[in-house]
Amino acid sequence: MELFTTLGFLFVRSLEAQCDRDNLVGNAENGGEIIAVTKMYINPAGCVGKKSENAPGKPMLMIAGYELLSRGHPILAPGVGHDGDKDKFSTFKSTEVYSVPWGNPGISSAISSGGPQSARPAAPRRQPQNFGSGNVTPICMITPYISKWRICGLCTAKEELKTTKARSGAGDMKIFSFELTDKDGSSIRITGFNDAAERAYSIIQTDCSYYLSGCTVKQANKRFNTTGHDYELSLNANAEIAPCHDQIPKPALVLKICPLINIPSHKDEAVDVLAVVDRMEPVNKFISKQGRDCVKRDVQLIDQTATVVQLTLWGEQAENFEDHALGQVISIKGAIVKEWNGAFSLAVASGSKIELSPQLDVVPKLYEWYMSERAKVDTKTISMVSTGAGDALGRDLRFIGTATALQLGNEAILPNGRYMNLKAMITTLKSDNALYQSCPNEGCNKKVVQLGMEQYRCEKCDTTSSSFKWNYMVQAELTDLTGSLWVTMFTNPAAKVFGIEAQKLGDLKDVDKDAYNRVFQDVCFKYFNWRINAKPNTYNEETRMRYSVLGCEPVPYDRYIPQLELTLEKLEQLEC
């Protein structure tokens, strides 16, 4: 085995306390330490030996996580300098990772720190562990940079074999996913397609242990992967699955708890949640637009951040969710964060794990907070509990002057812009261009090009029709006591504002121009509660804010006035 050396590495600042606690001294008189680097970053440009932009230095390794394995070791062998150029070392064997019985580094430290060099215990033999039929790699160490590995884990989640349409359009595709968890509690998701999916589905059984090797390692898709692992495995022709007769015990529940207040930062990702069931809606059974029978149940959760979020359960999970769960602590491992019009909610995937009153040390404190503080705190809801424009009134109410002065929506951390509510009136309308001729095909609203008499071309559908349908695209100026801004209204919100469908208004335009204009005049200078999306838009290398109307309703004064009073109270408490 060759030992490579590098001068370019450092520990990140967050590890300062751990380094002090472990008393890392390096190649001192009593010998140096052996550590396992569990997380690191590589700066390719580096800063070691860098003299100019044209002569960059060696790559800099930034250690972000490590484990102390043993201490008190002399230099094991002369090191080979490595400048980061992999082509110079192409003849060396690829890295193979094994599970090694390192023992207790704390005991080794205590023994070696007090006596002479000869009294130190011998370093543990680095023999790979044998699990029945081969060397085993810890699941947490699986990365694309390890060419040979073999994992052993317990199947803790198994999905059904599904059939879906292939993206290429070449017929149906079968897909199957499952999760393996090793003895250390680390999990990884494995997915197979077509023949590999059918073969794995016939082998894998929940709560049974398996060896797995030869898969393709790829970046985890956080939208579907609830394991918390940075990578996932894809079954290919070289994949090998074999049963393990040394049964692995079912792992204890391990949560990387995400406070509910931080959920908006994890859109479309899987998070672990620990909260209290604050409210439960009845089971709702309905028929979807596709004609399928659906079962749904909404549950509101709250935690010590006084943040309320909605959890949506479907199917058997909705029907089997226990009614006595109200007021109980619930843990969800792998909840999926959903976002719609600026509101966030939680959903559960096939690999998500729900448990009531979990056996965790933090649960009693959460119970105590809920019993003593829940009735006193002002809660913040990040979910819409229904579909009206006023659902988020208290959370997102803004003045136009504030929105424009602060450029709300033009923020790097909000790729979808900012959602807000405005109490404002229409002061100006461009009625002449409020309608456009669109494709008559269902589901298509693309503007058509008139080719001749009763000939209309849709480039999106690649069709020519003898008719078209009218659609709204209204430019309007909204004004409140602090300022004004221009917004765009499309078909659905515009039809609600004007009280007439676009097709009927288009027909009216041709037969009675005065009646057509009165439709627009009647809505001016009347206050509405507007649901707005603010987002920057770049055209011809010029960036401007674009405001789109998502919804509109009469001002709910029963909620609007108390919100103003609450704002005034907070302003009065500010110190000048």
Image (cartoon, grey):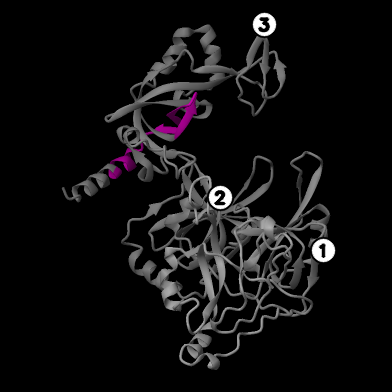
Q: Are marks 1 and 3 in contact (CB under 8 Å)?
A: no
Mark-to-mark CA distance, 2 and 1? 31 Å
Q: Quadrant of the N terminus?
A: bottom right
Q: Is residue 107 above or below residue 144?
A: below
Mark-to-mark CA distance, 3 and 2? 48 Å
Judging from the image, what secondary structure is the residue with disc 3 in? Answer: loop
Q: What is the span of residues highlighted in magenta in the rendered image?
A: 535-563
In this picture, residue 173 sits left or right of residue 473: right
Judging from the image, what secondary structure is the residue with disc 1 in? Answer: helix
Residue 216, image quadrant: bottom right
Residue occupied by mark 3: 453
Residue 47 is marked as: none
Name the one closer to the observer, 94 or 21: 94
Name the one closer to the observer, 562 or 91: 91
Q: Considering only order in the chain, which callout, 1 or 2, is on the residue closer to the N terminus?
A: 1
**Total number of numbered discs in the rendering:** 3
